[in-house]
Amino acid sequence: MTPRPYRLGRRKAAADRTRARVLRAARELLTAKGGMARFSLDAVAERARVARMTVYYQFGSRRGLLEALFDSFAEGGELPERIATAFKQPDAQDTLAGIIMAFARFWDAGRPWVRRVRALAALDAELGEAVDARNERRRHLVQALVQRLGDPNPESADILYTLTSFETFDTLAGPDRSLEDAAPSVLRIARVAINARRGRHAGTA
């Protein structure tokens, strides 16, 4: 006899709450004083007030926990939905604008946290690998974007990859503006760069 649906629903809800509590504890611990030096499954479990095996069963490893933490950050910032909406635009230029604004809002939502994590990633190989994996996702995204723009040159993808990075928005915004405020500048630079490449290509055709 299978469990009744409401029992399964209650178990899933409880598991989701536990997962959210663990991810919240992981984020707090990662950005606390000491950072990666204190970041372990044991430390996260203690902070979340759950058994270590609960964390292990949910995430498998320290790297798995980091990956899930980054995914939850992206989902909380509605990045996947905004990217999907941008790619549904009939005009490729509107897609470009939508992608840039999506990353501006995403980076801005967690600006202090992202800055801290990227600094720690330079000191911890495992965290660095997790950050690099997320960066590769963004690289694949901009490769699809330049295809949509009709400019599949690898250099164009490299330019957009650089322009959509946290560091670009953070630098352009400076200490007194939000990263969303920097989005129009990023968009202008992207359009100038892409048009310049098209012009060079047309001149050599």
Image: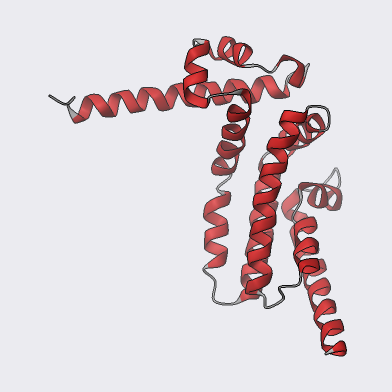
The vertical placement of 45 against 180, above or below, is above
What is the residue that sits farthest to the left in this orientation?
1
Q: In which quarter of the image is residue 112?
A: top right
Taking the spot 56% from the left edge, 33% from the top edge, the residue there is 68
The vertical placement of 65 against 51, above or below, is below
Q: In which quarter of the image is residue 201?
A: bottom right
- Estimate the x, y position of residue 178 in percent, counting from the top left: 76, 48
Judge left or right: residue 153 versus residue 12: right
- Estimate the x, y position of residue 17 in percent, counting from the top left: 43, 24
- Estimate the x, y position of residue 77 in percent, counting from the top left: 58, 44
Q: In which quarter of the image is residue 95?
A: bottom right
Judge left or right: residue 200 versus residue 106: right
Please, which colouring scheme is shown?
Answer: secondary structure
- Estimate the x, y position of residue 144 in percent, counting from the top left: 63, 65
Number of disc labels: 0
Name the image quarter holding the C terminus: bottom right
Taking the spot 76% from the left edge, 16% from the top edge, the residue there is 37
Taking the spot 67% from the left edge, 75% from the top edge, the residue there is 149
111 or 59, which lies in front? 59
Taking the spot 29% from the left edge, 24% from the top edge, the residue there is 10
55 or 83, which lies in front? 55
Name the image quarter holding the N terminus: top left
